[in-house]
Amino acid sequence: MPDLPTQQDLPPVAVGQHPSQQPPQPEQPPFSPPQPPQPEQPQVVQTAGDAKDGIDKCPHCGSSDIELNPQTGMLHCHYCHSEWSAPADALTGDVHQLSGIVIGSGAQDIIPSVDVVMTFKCSACGAEVIVDTREALQARCHWCRNTLSVNEQIPNGAVPDVVVPFRLTREQAQQHIEQFVSKRQFYANPTFKREFTTENIMGVYLPYMVVDVKGHVRMTGQGEHLVRRYTVGSKENRETRYDADLYDLGRDFDLLVDDLTVEASSERLQQNTVANSNNVINTILPFPMETAVQFNANYLRGYTSEKRDTNREALLGLIGAQTRDLARNRAKATATFYDRGIRWDTLDLAVSGQLWKTAYLPVWLYSYLQVKNDGSRFLHYVAVNGVTGETMGSVPVHKPKLLLVSGLIEVVGIVVGLALILLFA
């Protein structure tokens, strides 16, 4: 399995040469396999909880009737009403200290043959309780009513390393969605406006891979700096010209990436904008990973969740591309002198440390299925970040009204343009 490249000698940066003396160099492919081809073995950090018997008990009274209180982000005992938090994320650390490949035990490769149905022997009464991880990670014992939870990290993608708890209540999420839709009412489809209701919104924990990267970057390219701007030609054929100096430039710096977040669901990675708008999930990032805690199934009670179905190897290209984009943005911020633009010819990224962990992140989700006149269907989503309240989505538009307004704007633009021409003629 290919991994990110390790730290290695980088070619010297040629700065100050004339462009004709620099042969074109193709950009290196992102995160190519290291040399020699023997991949570095990842260090696995165990992040599973210690409730091996399946019962997470209240530390104050021993009850298993536990649920998340979204107003505080803490677990709440329904018996003694005490509140507490799960242990903090054990994989949080200083990116400067990263070395080699470190992964959380919940980020290990999924084993397709793992059974999705688990049987627990209740430690309170001895009864056997079945939990189908395709539907939920909790079940009640039918004899003693204790709640049994799947906390052991079975290798089927159902249990992540960490979870970011919901902080927005259902009512708050409904307000965010209603405000989002109300701002788009004018162009909204009449059928949608009649049928719109936030009663069907769902709180769902979506699977993500969260990655830290420590590396070193060297870049070479060319930049232009504006010297002067002037106008030539007659009144009818005036032309603005620019004189600029061309410079060879290079950048050499360490790159530290903290909590780069990508989806770990193949369905959302393969976005089909013809059939749905599930790509809106990316627009409500980021999630505050500093609030992440060790996974505990009680945080999921009352919400739905999706299992991770994507392994680390399948995400290497995406992580590599986003890391290189971050490198370009950082280099651009240090090159403001080149106000006419920069073209980077080479970008060499050597990675010396990386950390991978899986996380459940909270999203309030509204969906609406639009059946169009031609019989085709499109699934619209409005998503709300379950912590920050950031909201984005799509609503069906009324195309006749949209075309009418666009036509009016075009006519007004033509009339104003003609009036200006007559005024200054």
Image (cartoon, rainbow, N blue to C red):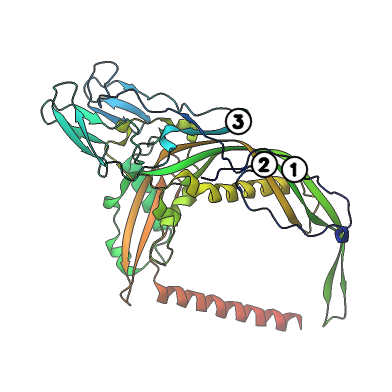
What's the residue at 83%, 77% (across, down)?
A: 238
Res. 221 image quadrant: bottom right
Q: What is the crowding at mark 3: few (fewer than 14 residues within 10 Å), some, or many (at least 20)?
A: some
Secondary structure at numbered mark 3: loop
Is disc 1 in contact with disc 2, using a CB cutoff of under 8 Å?
yes
What's the residue at 22%, 27% (across, down)?
A: 65
Q: Which mark is residue 236?
A: none
Q: Which mark is residue 99?
A: 3
Is disc 3 in contact with disc 1, using a CB cutoff of under 8 Å?
no
Q: What is the crowding at mark 2: few (fewer than 14 residues within 10 Å), some, or many (at least 20)?
A: many
Q: Is residue 133 left or right of residue 398?
A: left
Residue 354 at what x, y percent from top left? 57, 36
The amino acid type of the residue labelled 2 equals Ala
Residue 307 at what x, y percent from top left? 34, 44
In the picture shown, does residue 41 fall above or below 180?
Answer: above
What's the residue at 44%, 51% (across, down)?
A: 281
Secondary structure at numbered mark 1: loop
Residue 219 at what x, y percent from top left? 74, 48
According to the picture, the residue beneath numbered tag 1 turns out to be: 10
Res. 8 image quadrant: top right
**Distance between mark 3 and mark 1 Cα atoms:** 18 Å
**Distance between mark 3 and mark 2 Cα atoms:** 12 Å
**Can residue 215 be seen here?**
yes
Q: Earlier in the sequence, mark 1 or mark 2?
A: 1
The amino acid type of the residue labelled 1 equals Leu
Q: Earlier in the sequence, mark 3 or mark 1?
A: 1
Residue 396 at what x, y percent from top left? 38, 66
Q: Is residue 278 left or right of residue 423?
A: left
Q: Farthest residue in the top direction?
A: 60
According to the picture, the residue beneath numbered tag 2 turns out to be: 350
In the picture shown, does residue 141 fall above or below 225?
Answer: above
